Amino acid sequence: MACGVFVVAEVILRAYWLAGGRWAYTACDRTNLVDPTGGCGANRVETLPFWAGWGAVGVGAALAVLVVCAGRLPGRYPAAGSWAAAALLLVLAFPLHLLFEIPAALAGRPSDWRDLGARLALGTGGLLFIGLANASAPRRGTREAGYRPVPRWTRRWAYVAVALPVVGWAVPHGLWVLGVPFGIPQRQLEDTHRDLSTWTGAAITLVPPLAGLLVLGLTQRWGQQFPRWVPGLRGRPVPRLLAVIPAGVVALTLVTYGVLSSAVLVRQVLAGHTHWSDLREGWAVTATLLVFLCWGVALGITTAGYASTTRPRSGAGHGHALSRSRRPDLTPVSARKIGAKAEPDADH
């Protein structure tokens, strides 16, 4: 139901744009107008780009068919399609952009709220389709109650995922906020201080490492059972998807950003727009791309370890019963062999 509402709302909005309306539409990625709060001159756009108009309507129609199929014929294939739709929406939403832009906007930096709202809507749609995929997938059993310790390798990758945003992001950005040109030219530092306020710089510096601390929940007891101080939920098991979905989305976003940004940088170097001397002067900025990529990989591996540890186990009891059911079959066979050998003696 929720997925259907999301699809219908998006299709209606795109149809409104095709009809000439420009409410909630942004052109900040296609024009050079410096007006992020007004959508960068969205009202002046006469012809709507294909993927913002008819292309999006076509995708919405395909998603509507998927929602109907998943509701009427749940199973493996509708679940796989729902996972694919969720991945598409989350990639388009690019949550990493929200992680930096929303704190900066709240700190007073002019931001494109139309773009942020659209990304939030797409991210919400991705989460809804993840729920649809989980609801339409075949059941695999129930999760056992209690805490399951994660493997040692999962803990190690979690520590890496916590350390990377601190060392690779918070430290250099904190030095830049303090006026230290660490790994960047002095002119770039001056431009940064001119464009960003102190509060905005502090928000951009602190939010990623603080959010990165949540990955420790994938290795601790409070990531599987609610702590005692949580009213109404104390001691209850944490829903598995409540931890896996956000962590998986962030990991996918970080890896995507790292790969795409690195590809853009390589293309600029090959085209001659960026020189090796520029990379050497601003090596800290270049290294940030690798930080995002490695951070996403570490978070993804940690999430996979958590998901594997907390996976519902339905085959253990069945396998035990099956092994017990096979054992009595050996006794009649051996008894028949003994009886067959004893029959000639009985005839004598």
Image (spheres, rainbow, N blue to C red):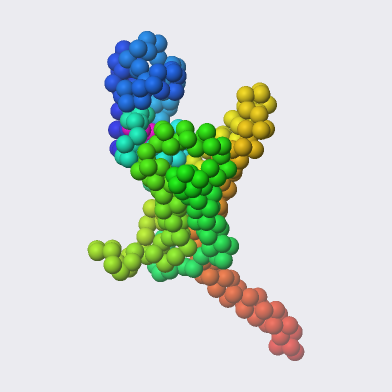
Image location of residue 340, percent across then percent down: 71, 80
Instruction: Please determine whether, in this image, residue 200 is positioned above or below residue 33.
Output: below
Q: Nearer the viewer, residue 315 or 190?
A: 190
Q: At x 66% / y 29%, what residue is drawn?
A: 275
242 or 291: which is nearer to us? 291
**Which residue is at 35% across, 17% downward?**
41
Residue 211's x, y, as percent?
41, 51
Q: Is residue 240 left or right of residue 164?
A: left
The quarter holding residue 128 reads: top left
Image quarter where the C terminus lies is bottom right
**Residue 118 is inside the magenta segment:** yes
Quadrant assignment, res 99: top left
Q: Is residue 180 above or below residue 219?
A: above
Residue at 32%, 15% in the rendered image = 43
Q: Is residue 142 visible?
A: yes
Image: magenta residue range: 116-120
Q: Quadrant of the N terminus?
A: top left
| Residue 283 lies in quadrant | top right
Residue at the farthest left position = 232
**Res 249 visible:** no
Give residue 142's position: percent from left, percent from top. Answer: 41, 60
Q: Is residue 98 magenta?
A: no
**Left or right: where 135 falls relative to 298:** left
**199 and 262: which is toward the camera:** 199
